[in-house]
């Protein structure tokens, strides 16, 4: 069985240094860093256009830092976990990594959907605590 691609799902913590999911994934096999712009999240009342401006700037920096490591950032627009289905079609077996996120009700429900999807699909999914909350 081929080594699964280690998909590191970037939610809000758009860093390379001190990023435990990225570091741990890199020890296990080839890494595919992934950021998904989700319309259901950005459509919320608590999401201002400035959020996207800041996120875009952070993604540019993240892309440059990951490129130096030979890990090109994949950015997709769509909904999770549907984007993961498309990634699996492209790369084959995956293992999913992410930081646990303290967000709002929409992100909480999205994370539950991704967890359920991973379990149903037999995709190992590890969420690493990122804060003491």
Image (tube, rainbow, N blue to C red):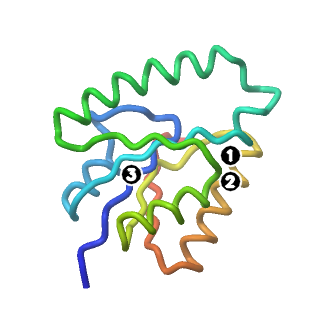
Viewer-side residue, 83 vs 23: 83
Separation (CA) of disc 3 from disc 2: 16 Å
Q: Name the residue furthest right.
A: 45
| Percent coordinates x, y for residue 62 in the rendering | 34, 29
Counting other residues with Cα less than 10 Å from the Cα at mark 3, is it few (<14), some (14-19), or many (20 or more)? many
Viewer-side residue, 90 vs 9: 90
The answer to whether mark 1 and mark 2 are in CB contact below 8 A is yes
How many numbered marks have been drawn onto this rendered protein structure?
3
Residue 107: mark in rendering:
1
Marks 3 and 1, the one that precedes in the sequence = 3
From the image, which quarter does the N terminus lie in? bottom left
| Percent coordinates x, y for residue 40 in the rendering | 74, 42
The residue that mark 2 highlights is: 110
Marks 3 and 2, the one that precedes in the sequence = 3
Residue 5's place in the image compared with 50, above or below, is below
Residue 106's place in the image compared with 90, above or below, is above
Q: Is residue 76 left or right of residue 117?
A: left
């Amino acid at each position: 069985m081929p080594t699964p691609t280690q998909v590191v799902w970037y939610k809000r913590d758009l860093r390379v240094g001190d990023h435990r999911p990225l570091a741990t994934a890199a020890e296990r096999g080839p890494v595919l860093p992934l950021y998904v712009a989700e319309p259901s999240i950005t459509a919320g009342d608590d999401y201002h256009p400035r959020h996207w401006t800041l996120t875009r700037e952070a993604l540019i920096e993240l892309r440059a830092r990951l490129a130096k490591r030979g890990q090109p950032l994949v950015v997709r627009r769509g909904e999770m976990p549907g984007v993961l289905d498309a990634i699996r079609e492209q790369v084959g077996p995956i293992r999913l990594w992410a930081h646990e996120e303290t967000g709002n009700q929409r992100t909480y429900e999205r994370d539950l959907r991704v967890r359920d999807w991973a379990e149903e699909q037999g995709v190992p999914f590890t969420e690493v605590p990122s804060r003491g909350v």
